[in-house]
Image (cartoon, rainbow, N blue to C red):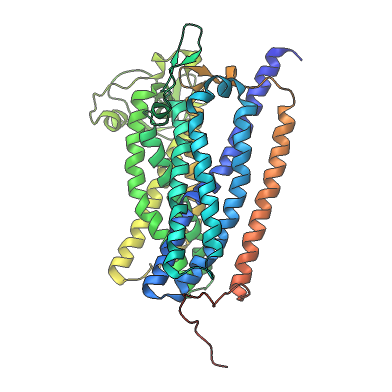
């Protein structure tokens, strides 16, 4: 095969495989970051208020947490191998710079795995508060793992902690500078808050569906209230962090920002475009809001914003329409979820109870899927917007990809494997849910739990 077509084919196959596996894994990673905290909230409530339903909910969630962690371990391992196998030009040259992030993440991963096991099997074997505190390292490890992995991605957007000599060889490696690069400050909190929103709305949506089907018992009330409240509290903070990140990107990665926001010509008084598509250097079928983009970037209508005209064609990100629509969908969903959380908060403040409107519960039932869509759109903007660079202004993506043959077969096999893995996960979780509803997995003999209520025979 001619080397040029092979290189082009490999680049597309490798990017498609990374996009698919990352898009799959990121949902599980989000659950691994945030679900332990929600489980501990239920556990704490059960201990402090001797709430049997809260303790039972925490026990059920701990089993779900273990299933999702196991599946996430598989998909995360695949991703770690892909980094080396698909992108040898990246790892071979720069692995010594940002590889420390993955080594640290491995420590957090095993810490989380160990304490999940202790927490899961400690329900009948540990004292009440000893068992609760055994769950705290899971939360800490989840956040630490997120910091480690996302800092590696932020390094690809804002490389630091090394020098290149005249031959292009990496020298003067400073791992801490690589980990805490300029993008770490906004990418890490953005991802962690996104994980709490995805997990909160996703778990709550399950109970919202049950609520719509007439299940109004205390399990469903608490099962909805705890994760939904966490997600609703995270939403306004996430919007603030996202706004800060957008301004940082406008300064540090102007090509990404220009393509995402349809900034065609450098200058002030840049409009904001809602919707539309980009073709032939022009924006079509969009709603134009004068000066809004300059105001968002620099709080001034005259703020100068770098446009695509200042970026060499070879350095411009592909698919501005994809970037623009993905970004706006992410922002739109974020504000919709913020409004949904405000609806919940206002209703609770007024009547100390959930909203009665069926429209609220219908919206809550789809909030989990909506949050996942926003998460995936965010990663599209992050990854596609960095192209054609795998390391911003240092290494082009086509120079990092493998020259091995057969990548499309590997991609096809990966899709089949993940489809089977995803289907199995859904089947297992649904089986657990059915057995819980039937009472087959109830374990009333938690040594520190309140005595279960007995129905009259």
Q: Splitting the image into 4 quarters, where does residue 181 fall? A: top left
Pick the front one: 352 or 130: 130
Is 453 drawn above or below residue 295 in the view shown? below
- Answer whether residue 367 is visible to the viewer in this image: no
Look at 40% across and 66% down and name the residue there. Answer: 44
Is 80 drawn above or below residue 374 in the view shown? above
Is 446 drawn above or below residue 83 in the view shown? below
Image quadrant occupied by the C terminus: bottom right
Look at 48% across and 82% down and name the residue there. Answer: 451
Pick the front one: 205 or 34: 34
Image quadrant occupied by the N terminus: top right
Q: Splitting the image into 4 quarters, where does residue 275 fall? A: top left
User: Which x, y percent locates residue 8?
Assistant: 65, 19
Q: Splitting the image into 4 quarters, where does residue 179 fall? A: top left
Pick the front one: 452 or 172: 172
User: Which x, y percent locates residue 69?
Assistant: 57, 51
- Answer whether residue 207 is visible to the viewer in this image: yes
Is 238 drawn above or below residue 288 in the view shown? below
- Please count the marks in the image: 0
Q: Farthest residue in the top direction?
A: 166
Compared across the picture, whether 213 is left or right of 271 comes to right
Q: Farthest residue in the right direction?
A: 1
User: Which x, y percent locates residue 127?
Assistant: 46, 70
Q: Farthest residue in the bottom direction?
A: 457
Look at 46% across and 48% down and name the residue there. Answer: 141
User: Which x, y percent locates residue 260?
Assistant: 43, 29
Look at 39% across and 33% down and name the residue there. Answer: 184
């Amino acid at each position: 095969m001619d080397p040029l077509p092979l290189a082009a084919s490999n680049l597309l196959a490798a990017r498609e495989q990374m996009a698919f596996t990352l898009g799959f894994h990121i949902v599980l990673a989000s659950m691994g970051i945030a679900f332990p905290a929600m489980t501990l909230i239920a556990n704490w409530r059960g201990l402090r208020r001797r709430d049997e339903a809260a303790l039972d909910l925490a026990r059920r969630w701990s089993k779900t947490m273990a299933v999702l962690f196991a599946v996430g371990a598989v998909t995360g391992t695949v991703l770690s191998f892909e980094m080396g196998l698909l992108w040898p030009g990246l790892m071979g040259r720069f692995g010594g710079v940002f590889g420390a992030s993955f080594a640290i993440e491995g420590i957090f991963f095993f810490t989380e795995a160990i304490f999940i096991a202790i927490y899961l099997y400690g329900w009948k074997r540990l004292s009440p508060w000893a068992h609760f505190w055994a769950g705290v390292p899971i939360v800490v490890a989840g956040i630490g793992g997120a910091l480690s992995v996302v800092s590696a991605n932020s390094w690809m957007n804002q490389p630091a902690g090394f020098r290149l000599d005249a031959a292009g060889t990496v020298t003067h490696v400073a791992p801490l500078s690589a980990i805490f690069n300029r993008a770490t400050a906004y990418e890490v909190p953005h991802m962690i808050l996104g994980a709490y929103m995805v997990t909160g709305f996703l778990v709550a949506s399950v109970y919202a569906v049950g609520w719509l089907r007439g299940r109004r018992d205390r399990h469903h009330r608490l099962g909805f209230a705890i994760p939904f409240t966490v997600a609703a509290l995270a939403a306004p903070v996430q919007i603030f962090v996202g706004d800060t990140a957008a301004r940082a990107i406008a300064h540090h990665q102007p090509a990404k920002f220009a393509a995402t926001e349809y900034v065609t010509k450098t200058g002030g008084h840049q409009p904001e475009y809602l919707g539309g598509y980009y073709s032939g250097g022009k924006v079509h079928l969009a709603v134009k809001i004068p000066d809004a983009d300059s105001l968002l970037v620099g709080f001034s209508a005259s703020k100068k914003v770098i446009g695509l005209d200042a970026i060499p064609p070879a350095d411009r990100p592909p698919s501005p329409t994809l970037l623009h629509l993905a970004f706006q969908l992410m922002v739109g969903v974020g504000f919709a979820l913020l409004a949904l959380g405000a609806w919940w908060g206002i209703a609770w403040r007024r009547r100390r109870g959930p909203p009665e409107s069926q429209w609220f519960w219908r919206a809550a039932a789809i909030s989990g899927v909506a949050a996942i869509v926003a998460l995936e759109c965010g990663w599209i903007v992050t990854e596609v917007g960095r192209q054609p660079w795998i390391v911003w202004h240092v290494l082009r993506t086509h120079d990092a990809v493998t020259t091995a043959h057969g990548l499309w077969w590997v991609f096809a096999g990966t899709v089949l494997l993940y489809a089977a893995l995803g289907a199995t996960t859904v089947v297992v979780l649904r089986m657990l849910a059915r057995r819980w509803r039937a009472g087959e997995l109830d374990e009333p003999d938690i040594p520190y739990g309140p005595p279960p209520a007995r129905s009259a025979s």
